[in-house]
Amino acid sequence: MSLVLRPWVFLLFHVLLSYESNFQRRNGVEATKRVFLYPQSPKVSSIVSNKYRTAYHFQPPQNWINDPNGMYLSQTTNFQIYNVEVAKDVSPNFSGPMYYNGIYHQFYQYNPNGAIWGDIVWGHSVSRDLINWIRLEPAIERTTPSDINGCWTGSATILNGDKPAIIYTGADPDKRQVQNIVFPKNLSDPYLREWIKSDKNPLIEPVGPGLNSSQFRDPTTGWIGPDGLWRIAIGAELNGYSAALLYKSEDFVNWTRVDHPLYSSNASTMWECPDFFAVLPGKNSGLDMSAAIPSGAKHVLKMSLDNCDKYMIGVYDLKSDTFVPDTVLDDRRLWSKIDYGNYYASKSFFDSKKGRRIIWGWTNETDSTSDDVAKGWAGIHAIPRSIWLDSNSKQLLQWPVEEIESLRRNEVSHQDMELKNGDLFEIKDIDTSQADVEIDFELSAIDTADPFEPAWLLDTEKRCREADATVASSVGPFGLVVLVSNNMEEHTTLHFRVYKSQQKYMILMCSDLRRSSLRPGLYTPAYGGFFEFDLEKENKISLRTLIDRSAVESFGGGGRVCIIARVYPAALIDGGTRMYVFNNGTSSVKIPQLKAWSMRRAQVNVKKG
Ligand SMILES: *[C@@H]1O[C@H](CO)[C@@H](O)[C@H](O)[C@H]1NC(C)=O
Ligand SMILES: *[C@@H]1O[C@H](CO)[C@@H](O)[C@H](O)[C@H]1NC(C)=O
Ligand SMILES: *[C@@H]1O[C@H](CO)[C@@H](O)[C@H](O)[C@H]1NC(C)=O
Ligand SMILES: *[C@@H]1O[C@H](CO)[C@@H](O)[C@H](O)[C@H]1NC(C)=O
Ligand SMILES: *[C@@H]1O[C@H](CO)[C@@H](O)[C@H](O)[C@H]1NC(C)=O
Ligand SMILES: *[C@@H]1O[C@H](CO)[C@@H](O)[C@H](O)[C@H]1NC(C)=O
Ligand SMILES: *[C@@H]1O[C@H](CO)[C@@H](O)[C@H](O)[C@H]1NC(C)=O
């Protein structure tokens, strides 16, 4: 859970309530009409426009969401029931591939009463394809002493083949964080609509020396160890440092804390939303943590801190029951990130249907809180991504789930282009505000690349600000400019730059939002991340970018650096947007292949009709 417990939020909420109900009345008429909120910049129309709402990212019809919570694929033996129910229960427009053996469930932190954090319940949606979603009633609400002050993030685990259970964090009457369990009321209900709280709650209390009772949350999915016992890890502050505390149980209800954490670090004071999973190097298939883990597998510990999701790769030492990272970096600025942009509180699950591991994260708005209240909605989830380990065992790779490709239409394709210094090529004939773009950049004369400086790794955003798209070097910057206004005043730039390191090359990928919008009061950083590039093995750098109105989600180098960003260009409302590939480096760049598509709108939590 991302605990946004800042008192000003509550204050602001009450101050804004009257404004909000005003807005809702207006909204009843038409939200996209031009309302000028900024007298100081009369050119910029109101942010209250449906054109900023994403068309195929996950979000509820209105209000606030944050963390994705337990996710799983239900594995009923009675597949028929599922399909009959889905077929007759959903809107006729519910489209996408049909599956015969299961439904994806997605739970999420949701405020039913407004577009800011507060009053959190567990929202619940179901899908057959991870793209089109049906919204159900909340699965968990604050109703018992052990969650009366909060029902926060947790995870689902499938017990004994097909019986799901969810362990989540509650806040008790003393505002201590405790762990609770719920089970489905009726396993024959294909949607698992209702969840029953155990009378054994709270299962786990924040007791023991050094444990901070207000920093004890976000249990992981359970896994079974070689002794046949279940395990979960919980994010905590222990003696002032960060820990993923380890608990064991025979029956998933009676839990005992193991005398050492799964892993801890004094590089920070608290980890939220730990995630622990097994991966095989070079195999883009996932592993089930509770099945036999093949030899050669590695383990990943992911944790949320510093506004982003970081991870370590290592091994799970079964004898000591601890996670042992391959490399320990004392400076947490150097830890690898799942995403170098706006992405937090992610959670992964093993998709037994397709044998892959899928990860999802939360992406917040980067306008102001009052803008969010005016819009009536805040927060999206990134596109679900397959996640696996690179064959070098050094980094995770991610790629949008293949199902998203079913939304593509109007393919535009260009081959064998060459971009010289200063060239700009417009990609036309698609909806540039709702698109999927895949480009390969082929490098020549790479040996002239500028030297790499390891100190840049400490602050990649600074490097992207300094070496921006207008600053020529030998190899790069080259890339894609999206959501460009007619006069180029507004634009969001995705670009690469190649540096020569000792035996290898280092690629800097940036997502520069600093000129993304003329609106005042937005958070517009230049996000960036580095990845290694092996010229012997590859001579192309790929870029995939999903543009979804106010979301720009990019995958560089085959998913080695991922960056999701939120942007609110005025041009999306006034005048429309364009898209270009460009090269501002002194050496030319070849584009053997460029493909772009418009993306259809997905049916995301629309009301049944
Ligand atoms: C749903 O599909 C019907 C028939 O194809 C169409 O007329 C209608 O506009 C669609 N509604 C939405 C909300 O897309
Ligand atoms: C459980 O769900 C099934 C399928 O929806 C339904 O037929 C049955 O009546 C439900 N049982 C109870 C006790 O609600
Ligand atoms: C526990 O965590 C809270 C929230 O960060 C902090 O304010 C408090 O000082 C911590 N308590 C101790 C004993 O460290
Ligand atoms: C819970 O598990 C512990 C450790 O296995 C055991 O000692 C204890 O008796 C169990 N408690 C209950 C109520 O079953
Ligand atoms: C932090 O942890 C490292 C490794 O466990 C240890 O070497 C170091 O002394 C610790 N630093 C502090 C300030 O406790
Ligand atoms: C949203 O994200 C930005 C950047 O990650 C951060 O500065 C801001 O505090 C976040 N807002 C909330 C409400 O968490
Ligand atoms: C390329 O560089 C020129 C000259 O500095 C600049 O005007 C232009 O905006 C740059 N292109 C992009 C996409 O930033």
Image (cartoon, helix red, strand yellow):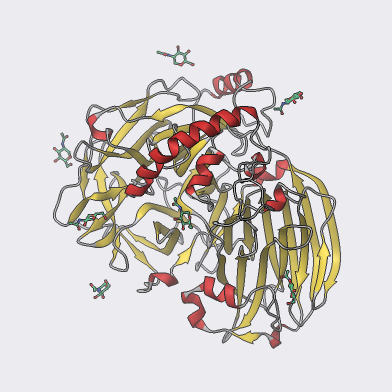
Asked whether residue 352 appears in the rendered view, the answer is: no
Which residue is rendered at x = 37% and y = 67% of the image?
325
Q: Quadrant of residue 419?
A: bottom right
Give the percent coordinates (x, y) of residue 127.
57, 33
Give the percent coordinates (x, y) of residue 252.
28, 37
Q: Is residue 252 above or below residue 307?
A: above
Q: Is residue 603 above or below residue 362?
A: above
Which residue is rendered at x = 30% and y = 50% of the image?
234
Q: How many marks?
A: 0
Determine the residue located farthest toward the front in the rendered image: 39
In the image, ligand 2 is in what quadrant? top left
Quadrant placement of the C terminus? top right
Which residue is rendered at x = 64% and y = 74% of the image?
468
Instruction: Give the left or right position of residue 78, taking residue 544 as reference.
Output: left
Q: Quadrant of residue 440?
A: bottom right
Which residue is rendered at x = 71% and y = 41% of the image?
406
